[in-house]
Image (tube, grey):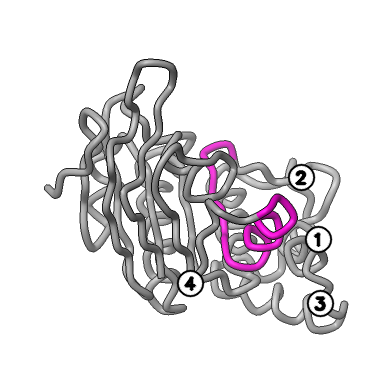
Amino acid sequence: MLHLVGLTKRYRERVVLDQLQLEVGSGEYIAIVGESGSGKSTLLNLIAGLDRPDVGSVIIDGADIARMHDDARTLTRRSKLGFVFQAFHVLPHLSVLQNVTLPLVLLGELPEAREQRARELLAEVGLAGREDSMPRELSGGELQRVAVARALVHRPALVLADEPTGNLDPDTAAVVLDLLAREIRSRRAAGVLVTHSEAAAATADRILRLDHGKLVPL
């Protein structure tokens, strides 16, 4: 589902990513760890098509997002990718239901179908009955559950999670990590978790360390 081929990124004279090779299949959930400044955020940006590599390919579901024009990359992000971030990025002026349906709105899904899909997914992540709540009424763990539901509602081929439990206490983090891993695997998405946390990385099927521009299996 995700295939990196010779992925290289430089900033001036510094090689941040050096000919990375990686394959992540459907239903597989991997974790990438590394020190601050090791290039983890750069790698996520390249996978998401928010930046372009100097050399190499980022193939998602058979298409190289690194070679697409801007409009095609935007459409690929909307239709093929789901994102879960440390800061939640839940829109404060929208209800829980509206936040989760937003990816389907952008894809032109009919209102009745998108609401039904969002309600089903909110029930799966333990937020049934909170559809009309506003983000300010939710705890950090509940907000991250909303973010997980929003990331999965359009059935993405690839889910990217960037330090998704950095703002949560350990017990809540464990619940969210279990939920994220279970949902990725059950929906046959490919999942990439970037984290500093060994506990978070341990929930993945495979752990890689980004070190001096290379991905090293652990």
Identify residue type, mark 4: Asp
User: Which residue was labeled with disc 1?
Assistant: 98
> Residue shown at 51%/70% (left/top)?
157
> Residue shown at 79%/50% (left/top)?
134
The question of residue 75 being in magenta is answered with: yes
To which quarter of the image does residue 19 belong? top left
Asked which secondary structure carries label 1, the reply is helix
Please rate how many residues cluster around mark 4, counting C-alpha atoms within 10 Å: few if below 14, some from 14 to 19, many from 20.
some
> Residue shown at 65%/72% (left/top)?
154
Which-is-in-front pick, marks 3 and 2?
3
User: Which residue was labeled with disc 2?
Assistant: 91
Spatial CA distance of label 1 from label 3 is 13 Å
Please rate how many residues cluster around mark 2, counting C-alpha atoms within 10 Å: few if below 14, some from 14 to 19, many from 20.
some
Please rate how many residues cluster around mark 3, counting C-alpha atoms within 10 Å: few if below 14, some from 14 to 19, many from 20.
some
Identify residue type, mark 3: Glu
User: Which residue was labeled with disc 3?
Assistant: 109
Q: Is residue 11 above or below residue 72?
A: above
Q: Which is nearer the N-term, disc 3 or disc 2? A: 2
The reply to whether dot 1 and dot 2 touch (C-beta < 8 Å) is: yes
Asked which secondary structure carries label 3, the reply is loop
Q: Which is nearer the N-term, disc 1 or disc 2? A: 2
Q: Which is nearer the N-term, disc 1 or disc 3? A: 1
Report the quarter where the N terminus lies.
bottom left
| Front one among 68 and 185 | 68
User: Which residue was labeled with disc 4?
Assistant: 61
Query: What stretch of residues is rendered in magenta?
Result: 69-87
To which quarter of the image does residue 204 belong? bottom left
Residue 3 in the image, given as x and y percentages of width and height: 36, 62
Residue 4 in the image, given as x and y percentages of width and height: 35, 55
Q: Which is nearer the N-term, disc 3 or disc 4? A: 4
Marker disc for residue 194: none
